[in-house]
């Protein structure tokens, strides 16, 4: 397992160096033993190998060549500080897939930060302007306390963009941001995104054709084809993968910055593995459980 960690880290670092070394970010006055790109590579490797905490990771690297290059507390601080850099890397990798699809899917996923019984006395993310709230997940038929993760992916499950919002904010509000991120494409959503006004605005402002299944009692019914229903399920599989292999639905963060860092790291790790699968190993890009080393 230790050898696999180092081997996976070296492969990921090599491909990040080849494709993302031109991305500029702040540099430290004192040259650290691990560069910013190496920190991101280690972070991605940890997420890919399902190390869900720094404690697990640093137990795994003990006795390897990485052991004396960084301390756990320093790694944690730098990882959070590099969240913007990590996102730039994710966007750069995501752009490599842009030619594959012009159809996108939007959905949201619940991010519970603590049990409902603890919500009123919880201090997690409580000191931030964007505070957690009570919300309802229709897919799970359950109320929860936390945030919503809004996701836009293409039909190949490559994440195009994402954002966090309090759980009590309706999904349809995310469409306000989508028109600035997408243009000249088709967008598929579920019934949470039904709105004639938003559909018209998306089309006129960015030439985005929004398709959603109609409610059974809606006037002027329009067909939502079985092909679109099947393609929309791709984002549900993506969310299941993020929850399964990357433990996205398990919150260990205490601050909003920590939560954003964790979510960004997990999505970037997924995108990195998809990139390796397609462009390096020439295999199914969503076969994310295969060892890359």
Image (tube, rainbow, N blue to C red):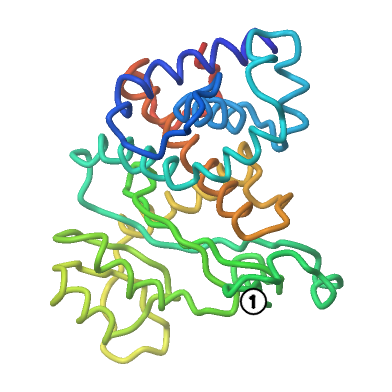
Q: Indicate the quadrant where residue 25 lies.
A: top left
Residue at image location 68% in from the left, 8% down from the top? 64
The x, y position of residue 152, in whole percent, is 38, 56
The x, y position of residue 49, in whole percent, is 62, 26
Dot 1: element? strand
Q: Indicate the quadrant where residue 212 lies.
A: bottom left
In this view, the residue in front, 293 or 61, is 61
Q: Is residue 72 above or below residue 194?
A: above
Residue at image location 39% in from the left, 23% down from the top? 277
Q: Is residue 194 left or right of residue 47?
A: left
Residue at image location 25% in from the left, 66% down from the top? 180
Q: Which residue is mark 1?
A: 135
Q: Indicate the quadrant where residue 168 lies.
A: bottom right
Mark 1, Cα crowd under 10 Å, few <14 / some 14-19 / many 20+, is many
Instruction: Quarter of the image for the N terminus: give it.
Output: top right
Q: Is residue 223 left or right of residue 128?
A: left
The x, y position of residue 159, in whole percent, is 39, 47
């Amino acid at each position: 397992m230790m050898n696999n960690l180092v081997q996976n880290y070296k492969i990921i670092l090599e491909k990040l160096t080849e494709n993302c070394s031109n991305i500029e970010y702040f540099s430290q006055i004192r040259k650290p033993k691990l560069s910013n790109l190496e920190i991101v590579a280690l972070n991605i490797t940890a997420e890919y190998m399902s190390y869900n905490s720094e404690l697990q990771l640093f137990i795994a690297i003990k006795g390897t060549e990485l052991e004396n290059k960084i301390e756990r507390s320093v790694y944690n601080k730098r990882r959070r500080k590099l969240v913007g850099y990590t996102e730039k890397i994710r966007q750069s990798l995501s752009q490599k897939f842009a030619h594959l699809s012009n159809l996108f899917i939007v959905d949201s996923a619940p991010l519970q930060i603590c049990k409902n019984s603890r919500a009123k006395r919880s201090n997690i993310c409580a000191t931030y302007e964007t505070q957690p709230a009570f919300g309802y997940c229709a897919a799970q038929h359950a109320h929860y306390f936390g945030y919503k993760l809004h996701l836009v992916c293409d039909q190949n499950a490559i994440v195009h963009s994402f954002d966090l919002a309090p759980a009590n904010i309706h999904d349809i509000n995310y469409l306000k941001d989508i028109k600035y991120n997408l243009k000249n494409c088709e967008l598929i959503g579920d019934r949470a995104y039904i709105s004639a006004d938003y559909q018209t605005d998306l089309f006129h402002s960015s030439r985005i054709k929004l398709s959603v299944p109609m409610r059974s009692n809606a006037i002027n019914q329009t067909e939502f084809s079985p092909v679109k229903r099947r393609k929309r399920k791709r984002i549900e599989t993506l969310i299941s993968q993020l929850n399964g292999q990357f433990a996205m639905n398990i919150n260990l963060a205490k601050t909003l910055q920590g939560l954003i860092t964790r979510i960004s790291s997990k999505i970037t790790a997924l995108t990195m593995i998809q990139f390796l699968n397609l462009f390096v190993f020439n295999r199914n890009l969503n076969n994310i459980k295969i060892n890359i080393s």
